Image: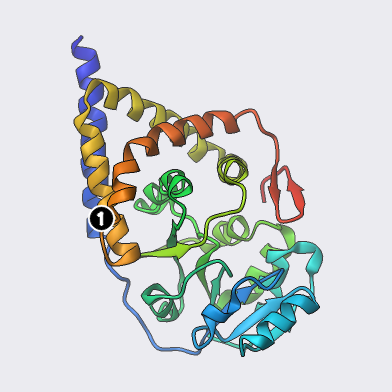
Amino acid sequence: MWIFWIFVAAVVAYEVAHLAAELRIGAPTRGSCRAVVVVPTRGGGNLARFAGHVDYVVVDGAEAARAAEAAGLRWVANRYVELGKSGALATALEVIDADLYVFVDDDAHPGPWLEALRGMCGRFATAYRWVLGRLQNAFSLGGLDWMVWRRTRFLYGGAMTVPGERRREAVVALKRCPVDDMALTKIAGDIAVLPLLVPMDPAPRTWEFFTRQAVAARLGNPLLWGVELVYYWAWVAAALLFPPLFLLHAARTALRSRRALGRVDWAQVLLSPLERPLEAFVFLASAFRRCFKWGAREFCGGC
């Protein structure tokens, strides 16, 4: 029986260390440079929310161009439509001159995180998402766990920066890989993480969103995916033996909601007991999927 309690103690110790590390993440030193905020979009989205916040929209057709003009935003046409979002980012890097490129998804909600990213001169930096759909958020927050440790950080494609001096290298990487965050994480090296979360609209199909994220993790970094799979199941087992773990996780969710929304989202806190079991189940299901849907394409390999 003592072996089980050693196992539980190890999981609790890791969770406490992780929470402490998350609390210690501070805003990186900001600089002043020529930064441009760029939003890639396909159908136009709700671009009006970005008026006064972004500098350019990269469009892939007339409908998106009209939406950008209606919102009073400057736009450029995607030169590499066949590459989807990666093509849009590569286009921005090629045709817009800047010291820092801030790339933002068209389903994000502008806030303090956006100005913080503008100040990340000379650095690859990212902020992670807070999905404004509670069940999707319960799964998605697992990705933030791995932002805490430098070795497992990745550029979250919804809110990230590329330094101007690395633009040519970034263009090459994006043209090789249609999954933008995979492509740029591979070349980034050190990644700065802001202690802020980005409110994002939920994806249209929840199960597809779950499996896409998990399969992308497996194809992009199989070792990390394996660690996540084992850890989430270990956490669930430990929490069943030691229920106070759920309270520790609820405290973490409360902290994160304050960073995303400026207030504690108590409804999300009440859902927090579902987070780890949901992540464990989805990661296990992803072991049996070879591909995931990325835009209009099926993606079946790493970058």
Residue at left 38%, top 36%?
274
Task: Tell me if residue 71 comes above or below residue 136 in the rendering.
Answer: below
Q: Nearer the viewer, residue 218 or 243?
A: 243
Q: Which of 55 and 93 is in front in this view?
A: 55
Is residue 289 in view? yes
Task: Tell me if residue 297 comes above or below residue 166 in the rendering.
Answer: above
How far from the left and from the top, in percent, is residue 37?
Answer: 54, 81
Bin the neighbour count of mark 1 within 10 Å (Cα to Cα): few under 14, some 14-19, many 20 and up.
Answer: some
How far from the left and from the top, in percent, is residue 12?
Answer: 22, 33
Q: How many marks?
A: 1
Quarter of image, res 175: bottom right
- The amino acid pointed to by label 1 is Leu
Residue at left 34%, top 80%?
30
Residue at left 76%, top 76%?
63
Q: Label 1's element?
A: helix
Name the residue that disc number 1 marks.
255
Task: Tell me if residue 170 comes above or below residue 228 in the rendering.
Answer: below
Task: Please identify the quadrant where the N terminus is shown.
Answer: top left
Task: Tell me if residue 22 comes above or below residue 53 in the rendering.
Answer: above
How far from the left and from the top, in percent, is residue 173?
Answer: 67, 63
Q: Is residue 56 left or right of residue 84?
A: left
Is residue 95 in view? no
